[in-house]
Amino acid sequence: MNLFEWLRQQNIRVNNRDLITNAFTHSSFVNEQPSNTHDNERLEFMGDAVLQIWVSTRLYLHEPILHEGQMTTIRAQLVCERALANYSRQLNLNQFILLGHGEEKSGGRNRDSVISDMFEAFIGALYLDSGMGSVDVILNQCITPLLTNAETLIVTDYKTKLQEFVQADLRQSIIYEVVSMKGPANQPEFEVEVKLDHLVMGRGQGPSKKKAEQNAAKDAFSKLVR
């Protein structure tokens, strides 16, 4: 199945095939093609803006009402690189990206940075080609289900909470150490320990070092406030 057959299955009518193809064209492919081929970076810029307004609108209309801080936190999680890459994988869009040989061999088709940029460009191209209705078709599949319980997307900054809890005693220092990393490069799993004056107080796992640190801090914080 090619890209345009896939789009027909989604009931999306394409007016400008070149524009849509452009969204799936990585710069590495352009470097190996004639000069009249364009990469997707300009469409990526457009798609970023469309995603921001689409998600912001849904959060503003969410029931129960979310306050500004909650909306900002949730939006950041819904449009971050890893989230956009996951949407691409969910829809299997990365099968359509055009890559140079070197990028293909190095695993670019499954690299978060590459396929998240492609997803933004795709959304930008859809908007320019046929408006927000086509964008709705795609984003309703991968983002709307996450908004059913939007409150669960709010992540407490446990690293800050832990720091505030121990800051009264300036002799105590907080250190985060990665103790293991498992899984493939495109889907790693980190394990982090948080130490207070070299004493292990908490452990946490996560798909990124930052997330694992937050989970370790949450573990330590929960023990300290018992």
Image (tube, helix red, strand yellow):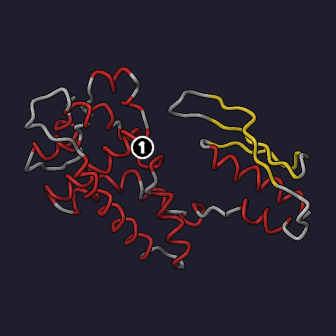
Q: Is 200 situated above or below 111?
A: below
Left/right placement of residue 123 relative to residue 160 reads left
Q: Specify the quadrant that holds the C terminus.
A: bottom right
* Number of marks: 1
Give the structural element (helix, strand or loop) at label 1. helix
Residue 222 or residue 111, whichever sits in front: 111
Where residue 68 appears, x then y in whole percent?
51, 78
Q: Specify the quadrant that holds the N terminus.
A: top left
Residue 145 or residue 111, whichever sits in front: 111
In the figure, residue 52 lies in which quadrant? bottom left
Where residue 10 appears, x then y in whole percent?
24, 46
Where residue 215 appears, x then y in whole percent?
72, 51
Residue denoted by label 1 = 85
What amino acid type should be assigned to the residue bearing mark 1? Answer: Ala
Where residue 154 appears, x then y in whole percent?
60, 64
Residue 87 or residue 82, whichever sits in front: 82
Query: What residue is shown at x 55% (from left), y 72% (from top)?
Result: 70
Residue 195 or residue 217, whichever sits in front: 195
Q: Is 67 situated above or below 98?
A: below
Left/right placement of residue 167 relative to residue 72 reads right
Query: What residue is shown at x 54% (from left), y 66% (from top)?
Result: 73
In the figure, residue 60 lies in which quadrant? bottom left
Query: What residue is shown at x 29% (from left), y 62% (from top)?
Result: 50
Disc 1 crowd, CA 10 A, few/some/many (<14, 14-19, 20+): many
Query: What residue is shown at x 81% (from left), y 54% (from top)?
Result: 174
Left/right placement of residue 193 relative to residue 43 reads right
